[in-house]
Image (cartoon, helix red, strand yellow):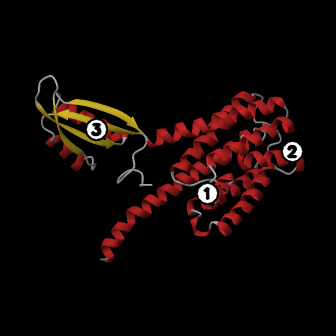
C-alpha cells in the first residue's frame, strides 16, 4: 500500500512544483512590470499599487515601500479574519511580490521613467502585470492587496465583490487626476479600462480547449484513439442523417489544443468521410480539466 501511495503522491508533487514555478515567474513579471513601468510614470490603475502611488506623492515615501507595508498589514488581517481559508498560494505570491518590490527598490532605484515615451510605457504597464495577474488567477491565487479585502467581504457580507472593487479602483483613478494632473490621470484611466480586458483575454487563452462533434458511421477506431492514445474520454450517441436517412454515430469530446491537432489528423487519415465540428471553449469543468465549483 505504501508503494502505491508514494507513486500516487509523486505526480501531485510534480504538479504542485510546476504550479509554484509558474507562480514564481508570474510574480516576478508582475513586480517588474509595476516597478519599472507603472511607478515611475505614476500610472494609477487602482488596488494597493494605486493607493501606494497616491500616498507616495503625499508622504514622499517610496511607492514600493508603501506596497510592502500595505500588503503586510492586509496579510496579517487575512490571517486573523480568514484563518485557514486564506489559500497558501496567495500567501506565497503576496509575500514574494512584496519582497521583490523591496529588493527592486534598493537594487536599482528609479528616479525617472525608463524612456521618454509614456504611451509605450503605458502599453507595457498594462500588458506585463495583466498577463502575470492572469497566470496567477489561473492557479486560484492572488497577489494580495484589495483581493484580500474582497475575500473578507465575501465571507461576512452579501456585497457584490466585483462591483465593490471596481468602484474602489475607479475612485483611486479619479484621485490620480487631482494628485498627478490631467495627463497622468488620463493615462491611468486608459490603463484602468484596458487592464481587466487584457486579464480576461489572457485567462481565456490559457483555458481554451477544443470541443469536437464528430459525425461518422464507425466510432470505434476514433474512440479507441481518444481513450488509449490521447487518454481522454468521449460520449457517443446515435443520430440519423436528415437527407440520407442513414443511421450514424456522433462522438462528443473535449481536447487540449495539442491533442486536437492529433485527433483531427487521425480522423482525416482513417475516416475521411467523417463530418467534424470543432469549437473553441474556455469553460470546461470536470475530471481532467478544471475542478468542479
Instruction: Using the numbered discs, state the Cα–Cα distance from disc 3 to disc 2 in whole angstroms.
Output: 56 Å
Residue 223 drawn at (x, y percent): 19, 44
Q: Which residue is mark 2?
A: 57
Instruction: Using the numbered discs, state the Cα–Cα distance from disc 3 to disc 1 in whole angstroms.
Output: 43 Å
Residue 130 drawn at (x, y percent): 61, 41
Asked if one can make out residue 46 in the rendered structure from this viewpoint, the answer is: no
Q: Which residue is mark 1?
A: 154
Q: Is residue 246 left or right of residue 127?
A: left
Tell me if label 3 and label 2 are in contact, CB under 8 Å. Answer: no
Q: Nearer the viewer, residue 144 or 8?
A: 144
Say few, some or many: other residues with alpha carbon within 10 Å of mark 2 (under 14 / 14 to 19 / 20 or more): some
Q: Nearer the viewer, residue 24 or 82?
A: 82
Q: Secondary structure at mark 2?
A: helix
* Residue at 72% across, 39% down: 37
Q: Which residue is mark 3?
A: 262
Q: Earlier in the sequence, mark 3 or mark 2?
A: 2
Q: Earlier in the sequence, mark 2 or mark 1?
A: 2
Q: Secondary structure at mark 3?
A: helix
Q: Earlier in the sequence, mark 3 or mark 1?
A: 1
Image-quadrant location for residue 85: bottom right
Instruction: Using the numbered discs, state the Cα–Cα distance from disc 2 to disc 1 in whole angstroms.
Output: 32 Å
Tag in front: 3 or 2: 2
Amino acid at each position: 500500500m505504501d508503494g502505491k501511495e508514494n507513486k500516487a503522491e509523486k505526480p501531485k508533487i510534480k504538479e504542485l512544483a510546476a504550479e509554484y514555478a509558474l507562480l514564481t515567474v508570474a510574480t516576478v513579471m508582475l513586480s517588474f512590470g509595476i516597478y519599472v513601468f507603472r511607478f515611475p510614470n505614476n500610472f494609477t490603475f487602482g488596488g494597493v499599487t494605486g493607493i501606494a502611488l497616491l500616498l507616495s506623492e503625499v508622504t514622499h515615501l517610496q511607492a514600493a515601500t508603501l506596497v510592502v507595508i500595505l500588503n503586510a498589514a492586509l496579510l496579517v488581517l487575512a490571517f486573523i479574519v480568514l484563518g485557514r481559508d486564506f489559500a497558501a498560494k496567495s500567501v506565497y505570491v503576496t509575500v514574494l511580490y512584496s519582497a521583490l518590490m523591496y529588493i527592486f527598490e534598493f537594487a536599482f532605484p528609479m528616479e525617472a521613467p525608463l524612456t521618454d515615451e509614456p504611451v509605450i510605457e503605458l502599453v507595457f504597464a498594462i500588458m506585463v502585470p495583466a498577463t502575470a495577474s492572469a497566470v496567477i488567477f489561473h492557479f486560484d491565487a492572488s497577489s494580495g492587496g484589495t483581493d484580500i479585502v474582497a475575500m473578507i467581504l465575501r465571507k461576512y457580507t452579501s456585497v457584490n465583490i466585483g462591483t465593490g472593487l471596481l468602484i474602489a479602483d475607479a475612485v483611486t483613478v479619479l484621485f490620480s487626476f487631482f494628485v498627478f494632473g490631467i495627463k497622468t490621470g488620463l493615462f491611468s484611466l486608459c490603463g484602468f479600462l484596458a487592464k481587466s480586458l487584457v486579464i480576461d483575454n489572457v485567462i481565456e487563452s490559457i483555458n481554451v480547449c477544443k470541443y469536437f462533434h464528430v459525425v461518422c458511421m464507425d466510432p470505434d477506431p476514433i474512440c479507441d484513439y481518444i481513450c488509449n492514445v490521447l487518454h481522454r474520454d468521449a460520449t457517443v450517441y446515435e443520430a440519423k442523417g436528415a437527407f440520407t436517412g442513414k443511421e450514424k454515430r456522433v462522438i462528443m469530446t473535449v481536447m487540449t489544443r495539442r491533442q486536437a491537432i492529433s485527433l483531427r489528423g487521425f480522423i482525416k487519415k482513417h475516416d475521411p468521410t467523417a463530418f467534424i465540428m470543432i469549437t473553441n471553449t474556455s469553460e470546461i469543468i470536470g475530471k481532467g480539466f478544471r475542478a468542479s465549483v
